[in-house]
Image (tube, helix red, strand yellow):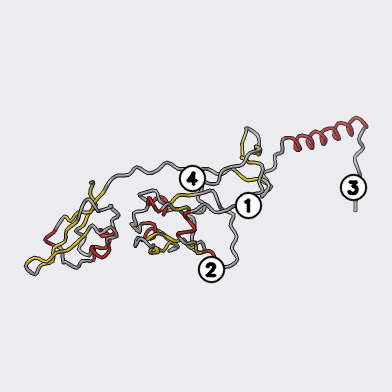
């Protein structure tokens, strides 16, 4: 077996290589190329549309149930409030953070946050009730720096700023188009009254004329939630512009 020999280097070559190593070390200490974020002392800057934990504004909710209908993980259930309206609850044990609920909320009652680091003691605590979604939660923060990834012509590096990123963002509210429910084929109505039972705003009522049940829709009370449209077995109800 041939023994590996150490190449001979002159004093000048050793000085040059040591100087190069020191230069790299000094550059890393001032302008590091590492992609590591020292959490929790630092936080990565998240975009305003980051899909984090949800906040809820009951004043903007029209109780349309759309968030519960659209949820692919069945994580959202509707809970009856003291005012007899139904508001969403979220089970984060099931939630996949797709934010279909936020995108489908016509009134902008559901909105996102940049909160993603939450710990629970057990699975039962992961069910978040409506009341817990209304007020901003108390957050213990240790971060003092904000970190952003930047890519130049050569490498990926981090930009560190001595500031704290806000976790609660105000997004642009959706453009509201007033809609009301309308029966397009009254002659096909079965008089089952399901639409009347489903209506949360009391806009749909029924009367009996000559032993025939007829439905009436009060356009002023209708919120355009679309629940009656979804539940109509004859599919004769439509949402139209108010």
Instruction: Give the CA distance from mark 4 to mark 2.
Output: 28 Å
Instruction: Give the CA distance from mark 3 to mark 4.
Output: 58 Å
- The dot on residue 4 is 3
Determine whether 24 is above or below 143 in the image. Answer: above
Q: Residue furthest front?
A: 82
Quadrant location of residue 209?
Answer: bottom left
Mark in the foreground, 4 or 2: 2
Mark 4 vs 2, N-terminal side:
4
Mark 1 vs 2, N-terminal side:
2
Characterize the local packing of mark 1: few (<14), some (14-19) or many (20 or more) Cα atoms within 10 angstroms.
few
Image location (x, y in percent) of residue 186: 13, 59
- The dot on residue 140 is 1
Image location (x, y in percent) of residue 203: 23, 57
Question: In this orientation, which residue lies closer to the viewer: 72 or 164?
Answer: 164
Q: Which residue is mark 2?
A: 124
Tag 4 secondary structure: loop
């Amino acid at each position: 077996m041939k023994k590996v020999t150490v190449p001979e280097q002159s004093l000048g070559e050793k000085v040059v290589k040591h100087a190069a190593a020191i230069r790299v070390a000094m550059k890393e200490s001032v302008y590091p190329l590492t992609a590591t974020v020292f959490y929790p002392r630092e936080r990565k800057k998240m975009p305003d549309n980051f899909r984090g934990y949800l906040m809820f504004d009951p004043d903007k909710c029209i109780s349309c149930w759309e968030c519960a209908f659209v949820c692919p993980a069945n994580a959202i259930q509707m809970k009856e409030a003291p005012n007899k309206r139904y508001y969403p609850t979220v089970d984060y044990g099931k939630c996949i953070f797709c934010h279909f609920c936020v995108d489908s909320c016509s009134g902008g009652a559901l909105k996102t946050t940049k909160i993603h680091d939450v710990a629970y003691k057990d699975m039962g605590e992961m069910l978040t009730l409506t009341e817990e979604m209304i007020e901003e939660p108390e957050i213990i923060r240790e971060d003092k720096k904000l970190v952003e990834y930047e890519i130049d012509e050569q490498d990926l590096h981090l930009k560190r700023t001595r500031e704290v990123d806000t976790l609660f963002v105000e997004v642009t509210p959706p453009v509201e188009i007033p809609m009301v429910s309308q029966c397009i084929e009254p002659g096909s109505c079965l008089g089952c009254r399901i639409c009347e039972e489903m209506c949360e705003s009391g806009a749909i009522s029924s009367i009996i004329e000559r032993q025939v049940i007829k439905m009436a829709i009060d356009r002023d009370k209708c919120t355009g939630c679309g629940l009656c449209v979804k539940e109509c077995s004859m599919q004769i109800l439509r949402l139209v512009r108010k």
